[in-house]
Image (cartoon, helix red, strand yellow):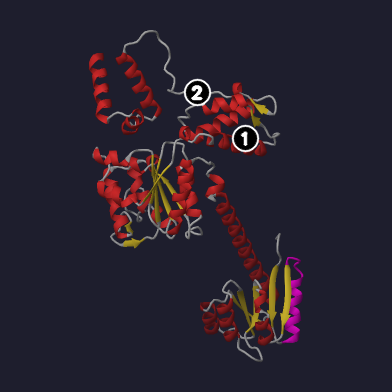
Amino acid sequence: MTGKPVKIFVVEDNEWYNKLLVYTLSLNPDYEVKSFFNARDFLNSLNESPDIVTLDFKLPDLTGLDVLKRIRQENSDIQVILVSEQDDIETAVTLLKLGAYDYITKSNDIKERLLNTVQNIAKDIGLKNEISTLRREVQQKYSFRNTIIGDSPAIKNVYGLIEKALETNITVIISGETGTGKELVAKAIHYNSRRKDKPFVAVNVPAIPSELIESELFGHEKGAFTGASFRRTGRFEEADGGSLFLDEIGEMEMNLQTKLLRVLQEKEIVRIGSNKPVKTDCRIIAATNRNLKEEVRKGKFREDLYYRLLGLPIEMPPLRERGNDILMLAGFFIERFCRENNLPLKRLSPGAQKKLLNYSFPGNVRELKSIVELAVTLSVNNEVEASDFTFEDQGPDLIPDEGDLTMRAYEMKILKATLKKYNNDIPYAAKKLDIGVSTIYRLLRQERESAE
């Protein structure tokens, strides 16, 4: 064992047994042992918060039962091992029900039994400390002002909405293009909320085959269908007390949308193959790269589910609309990549900065990270030059000069470039071009008809 020693208090009025227990436990350098001969002195030192107490059942001033109750009231994390001269099954069961870890009789094998029990408790303590450390690291990692990098008005607005989300358990729906950091926002909300010590369960809806998604979400009973050889706990049950992140919920099929709506309304699920409802308490955080309101209009998403999910909407801005955040993020990715790969810290040349700021980043933050890491790898000195950046797609911002074109041809080129830039999101493209959605449909229809 490493780290802080395990603190053990021995409470035993028999001097010989007291010395035996102290000596036996002190042989392990990872144990810090202190002894007491009566309950009064022990209880006066209880504020020292021992990890383990070996407690004689018959003390001169109080019974072991009374002392056990006091320990449970003061600090329920302390593990208590009762030591008794009598092997009384009924008493042992009573004490174990009240929270004692073990009941050991004063027999010839007490040393071996005691060491095994203390060793098991020490392992549990080590595991709990490790889990607590990991939780602290995760919470620090997802402190949103440290991980959602930026200083633009758009990202400051996101900060404000995240802070609002932390005040209640309101459902959150995060929208935005692919690669804008929607899952990062979901984790930031969970790990900074009152549910931070409970599970964060993520489900990528389109990644799960349609025939398995219901079982994945709600679970199933043994024998519910061919191949169901055991009971499966669904993601809703796994996330109980915590948060369930439904990524790309706009891809969910209509029949499952109906079942999801019922779960959100009733706050209970029914496993496949069962008629018994199971209560569930998890916060729903959903994400989509689609315009759900438009999907409702098209009949591809249930209107009642849309309003049930709406809650607090957070829209992640595309990177191209975040200005100098691009350079802040690039610097962050460069510093981390250099540190992780034992490279000297590099910086962006003025030309490289200009090149990044002029690129449209259709893949958003995810694309920026990949581009920056490749550029750092290709760079030959401590400064990353513009020539080190390679863009697979220079973006649809620039329309190539192909000679004289008619106004109609230019219109179509601009329209197609804009649709490509915004992943064929017609309402969003219409907004950017400052034209009506019907105009886009009309131009596309005319283009198709002329091609025929």
Q: Is residue 25 magenta?
A: yes
Q: Residue 380 at x, y = what percent?
A: 68, 24
Residue 7 image-quadrant placement: bottom right
The crowd level at tag 2 (other Cα within 10 Å; few <14, some 14-19, many 20+) is few
- The residue lying at 26 percent from left, 26 percent from top is 439
Q: Residue 332 at x, y = what percent?
A: 60, 38
Q: Is 185 placed left or right of 220 in the picture?
A: right
Above or below residue 260? Residue 332 is: above
Tags 1 and 2 touching, CB below 8 Å: no
Reading the image, the residue beneath label 2 is: 392
Q: Amino acid at mark 1?
A: Ile
The crowd level at tag 1 (other Cα within 10 Å; few <14, some 14-19, many 20+) is many
The rendered magenta stretch, by its main secondary structure, is classed as helix
Secondary structure at badge 1 equals: helix
Tell me where the magenta segment starts and ends, as one range: 14-30
Reading the image, the residue beneath label 1 is: 334
Nearer-the-camera pick, 428 or 256: 428
Q: Is residue 186 magenta?
A: no
Q: Residue furthest bottom?
A: 60
Secondary structure at badge 2 equals: loop
Nearer-the-camera pick, 217 or 261: 261
Q: Amino acid at mark 2?
A: Glu
Q: Which mark is residue 96?
A: none
Above or below residue 304? Residue 87 is: below
* Residue 418 shows in this picture: yes
Q: Residue 259 at x, y = what percent?
A: 28, 51
Nearer the camera: disc 1 or disc 2:
1
Picture quarter with the C terminus: top left
